[in-house]
Image: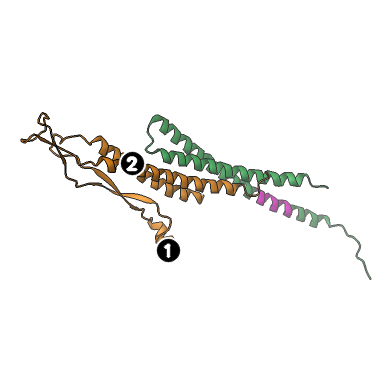
Chain colours: A orange, B green
Amino acid sequence: MDYSQAFEISASGMTVEKLRIDLTAVNIANMHTTAGADGTLFRPLRVVSRPGAQNFAGLFEDGSESSVYKLRGAQVFAVQEMTTAPRMVYEPGNPSADATGFVALPGVDHVSEMVNLIAALRAYEANVVAMNAAKNMAVKALEIGGNQ
Amino acid sequence: MNIDPIVGIPPAAAGALSAQAGEAQGETFSKFGTWFGQQIAEVNGQLQRADANLQQLALGDANNLHQVMINLEEAKLSFQLLMQVRNRALEAYQEIMRMQV
């Protein structure tokens, strides 16, 4: 059915937003973790998404120039580590404190993580609304000619 | 002015005619029948997939919730389409059965 394409596009957006929520949760969870056994400090993660690639068959069958821009969902391009400077907190009693008594904590920006959380949630909801609209259109189409 | 008398259709021709009609009717009927059967099988497959997805979800194996929900919606939509086709076919049949003879 041709409506399944609309569903697929919305689903791709939902997948991206779901990953964004997951990574934000990871960032928040690791807000106060110190360097692990291997000495590396956690770096905040970000999703990099881009328009989904059209499959080869689609390009082959539909050679028009405009086809490159239409009917492509979103896809996750990469999960990137942000290069924010670590937060230095004075905590001499901490086992991972350095010689001067400072502990390096990941540079997670709490406020921007919360904003990301809300934005991802709203974007997910918008995808669900778009999918429901497509579904309602299909249901309405099925009502054509029905005897109410 | 000559008016041709009403001549009955010769038995041989009549037989051929009715046989032809019957054949044509049978063919279209079977075509629609097979098509409808295929559609039913397809919808059934979709429903079974949705069911399997639900089972996976219940077992905690589903990788994403929205894909399961979308599959469910698609199966529901396909079934509704099937029902509408069935309603139209039945309506047509009843319309013919109501015909005055």
Circle 1 residue: A66
Rendering quarter of residue A30:
top left
Please give the range of residues in magenta.
B20-29
* Residue A49 image position (x, y, % from top left): 32, 50
Q: Residue furthest bottom?
A: B1
Q: Is residue A18 left or right of residue A91?
A: right
Tell which tag, 2 or 1, sits nearer the viewer: 2
Query: What crowding class fits label 1: few (fewer than 14 Cα within 10 Å), some (14-19), or many (20 or more)?
Result: few
- Say the numbered circle drawn on residue A133: none
Q: Is residue B78 left or right of residue B60?
A: right
Disc 1 is placed on an element classified as helix
State which tag comes first along the sequence, 2 or 1. Answer: 1
* Residue A96 image position (x, y, % from top left): 11, 33
Circle 2 residue: A117
* Parent chain of label 1: A
Rendering quarter of residue A105:
top left
